[in-house]
Image (spheres, helix red, strand yellow):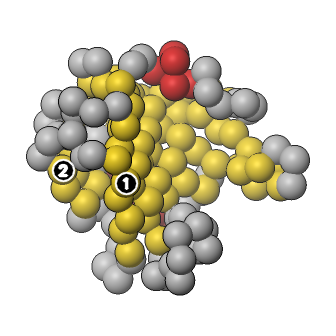
Amino acid sequence: EYRSDDLGITIPYPEGWYVSESGSGNQESGETIVDFYEHEPPAMGDAPTKMSYRFRRGSVEQVLGEFLAINDRQSVNRSGVSMIRVTYPYDEAAAPDVLMYAYVWQSGESVHLLTGPAGSAVLEYAVDNVEVTR
C-alpha cells in the first residue's frame, strides 16, 4: 500500500507493482502525484500508468474544470467518502474509445483524485479500500 501521513491517505495496490511519487508529498505544497505501474518503467513516461493519485490544493470544481471532455459525472460514496466519479477519454484525439475513470473528493482545502482505466479491478479495489484520515 502507498501511505502518506502528511496527506492523510493510504491507497492499496497489487504486490509487485512499482510506485513513482513526485511533488513534495505534503499538504502545504500545491501538488503531489503518485503513479502506479504494473511493470517497472525503463524510464519515466515509457510505461503506461495503471493508476494515478493526485493531491491538489483547491476545489473539486476547479479540478474537474481541467478535464477537457467529461463523458459522465456521477456522485458516489466509496470507502465512506463522498466522491464524484467522472468518465473521460484517455486521449480524445488518438483513442477516444478508451475510457478512464477519475474519482474526485474534497478534504478541507485539498482535492484528491484517483484515476485509472474504466472497469479496472485494481482501481475499483483501491477506491473501495482507500483510507482517508483527513
Q: Taking 2 as reference, is 47 above or below it? A: below
Q: Which mark is residue 4?
A: 2
* Amino acid bearing label 1: Ser
**Residue 91, position in %: x, y?**
77, 49
- The mark lying in front, picked from 2 and 1, is 1
How far separated are the C-alphas under marks 2 and 1? Answer: 13 Å
Q: Taking 20 as reference, is 109 above or below it? A: above
In the drawing, does residue 86 fall left or right of residue 11? right
In depth, the one of 20 and 73 nearer the eye is 20
**Residue 31, position in %: x, y?**
37, 37
Q: Residue at x 57, y 25 (%)?
A: 64
Label 2 sits on a secondary structure element that is strand
Q: Taking 77 as reference, is 2 above or below it? A: below
* Amino acid bearing label 2: Ser
Label 1 sits on a secondary structure element that is strand
In the drawing, does residue 79 fall left or right of residue 8? right
Say which residue label 1 marks. Answer: 22
In the drawing, does residue 112 fall left or right of residue 27? right
**Residue 29, position in %: x, y?**
28, 33
